[in-house]
Amino acid sequence: MRALPLALLGLTLAACDTSPGATDRAFQASGEIIAMGGGAGGPANACFACHGLKGEGDGVSTPRLAGLEQGYLQKQMEDYASGLRPDDVMTRVARGLTPDARRVVAAWYAELPAPAVHASAGPPPPIWLSGDAARGITACAACHGAEGQGAGAGQPIIAGQPAPYTLEQIDHWKSGKRRNDPRGVMAAAVQHLSEEEARAIAEWLSTRPAAQAHANASASASVSASAAARPAASRETRRPDRSDGA
């Protein structure tokens, strides 16, 4: 006999429990069930409809969630709900979930394997590694790692995301539409990027391997060491909190 998929098994068990509120509790007890069924918000809020069955994204404007850091994912959900990161769809979805449900679904996506990306042999854009102190542009690698695979808490993985999505987020930081970095670091970092530089960064990141959040400790140490050798102007805006990111 073939095993039932976990989400279907959860629904089956919920149906067997006739106690008051049991079905509602079951729908919010599993991150997978929330992702597939929308939790208390209902099927219209199901995460998989946009982000894919495995959290891989759509390769265009919807980002991958699989393998990203749990704290980062949870913080983004909280910011969608509060309006710090406005989005017509995601604000509705986030507000339809309780804080605990946001935590649970973030944890589920964080444990999913990062999707494979066909890496390019091309080097990163110069602005990525060096920044431009004259224009007040911090080196992207100082916070996001040499390969975009994150550099510790609050400096999330951005490798392997679709180029249109990354470019859109850069535009949102520049315009102020996205403002969920309490220190304004991302807004300052991208404010003076040219359109060509922003596009080059987004396209290069889309070719980088998508790392798993918990596998970044050694990469973080390496990037921190290399960043220490950079001019202070390119490092002064680094931050330890978990609220920044792409």
Image (spheres, rainbow, N blue to C red):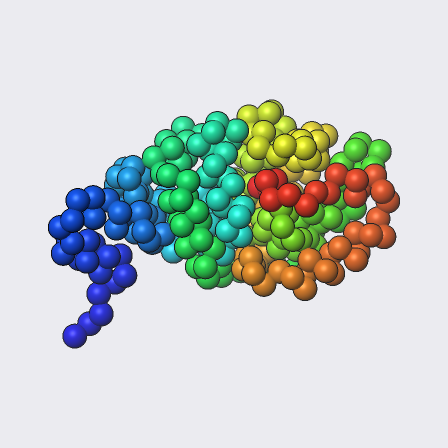
Which quadrant holds the N terminus?
bottom left
Residue drawn at x 67%, y 33% is 183
Question: Whole-percent x and y of residue 80?
Answer: 46, 33
Find residue 196 and report its image quarter: top right
Residue 125 visible in the picture: no
Residue drawn at x 79%, y 56% is 226
Find residue 121 and report its image quarter: bottom right
Residue drawn at x 79%, y 57% is 225
Residue drawn at x 19%, y 53% is 14
Question: Whole-percent x and y of residue 231?
Answer: 86, 44
Residue in the foreground of this view, choosing between 154 and 231 = 154
Numbered circles on residues, count:
0
Residue at the far bottom: name it.
1
Q: Is residue 20 above or below residue 118?
A: above
Q: Is residue 193 above or below residue 32?
A: above
Question: Whole-percent x and y of residue 132?
Answer: 80, 38
Residue in the foreground of this view, choosing between 210 and 41 = 41
Residue at the far front: name it.
19
Which quadrant holds the C terminus?
top right
Residue in the foreground of this view, choosing between 182 and 136 = 182
Residue 6 visible in the picture: yes
Question: Whole-percent x and y of residue 242?
Answer: 60, 44
